[in-house]
Image (cartoon, rainbow, N blue to C red):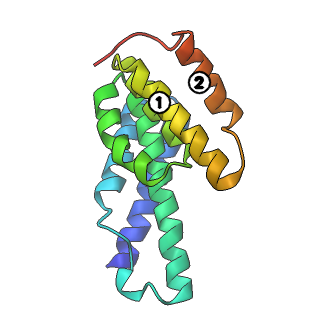
Amino acid sequence: SDQVDAYRFEQLISTGRRLLAGQNPQAARDYLTRALTLWHGAPYAEFHTHPSIADESARLEQMRLTALESSAEAGLLLGRTAEVVAELESEVRQHPARERMVGHLMTALFRSGRQAEALELYASTRSYLVEEFGVDTSADLQKLHTALLRQELGGRTR
């Protein structure tokens, strides 16, 4: 059952990401949401001590995070900022080094009229990356930060 779910999970994500790349955010979000609803905690948790299963579990978790980021991107394209904020807030706290996810949350916060929170998120992400890894934020996140400061990110949406 876990293997069948993992296969469906991967297929739905692959289709969703392809649809997003093909400029079809609504269908992409539908597929990615279906994939994410298959997720029920860490896969193969009962076998987590076995190295190859731990590797597979980590790979599937990375796929889940990528699917979440792609779904958020589609949500932003569709103007669903409140949904994106709700979907990403706790995930960003758990995965502060995922800059794509951080950027989507910053954008959603800004478009929800929460510019100060978006800027605080950038500052905390930057501090985390410097302290943990000795690196600054990516060029993409820096550009997004500059756009937020200049209020160049489009207006408020729902």
Estimate how packed mark 1 is, as few (under 14), some (14 to 19) or many (20 or more) residues with alpha carbons within 10 Å.
Answer: few
Report which residue position mark 1 lands on: 120
Report which residue position mark 2 lands on: 144
Q: Secondary structure at mark 2?
A: helix
Q: CA distance from mark 2 to mark 1?
A: 13 Å
- Quarter holding the C terminus? top left
Q: Name the residue at 41% across, 41% down.
A: 71
Q: Name the residue at 40% across, 27% down.
A: 117
Please give left or right for residue 158 compared with residue 133 in the image: left
The vertical placement of 1 against 118, above or below, is below
Q: Name the residue at 34% across, 34% down.
A: 85
Q: Amino acid at mark 2?
A: Leu
Q: Percent from the top left, x then y, of residue 77?
A: 43, 25
Q: Amino acid at mark 1?
A: Glu
Estimate how packed mark 2 is, as few (under 14), some (14 to 19) or many (20 or more) residues with alpha carbons within 10 Å.
Answer: some
Q: How many marks?
A: 2
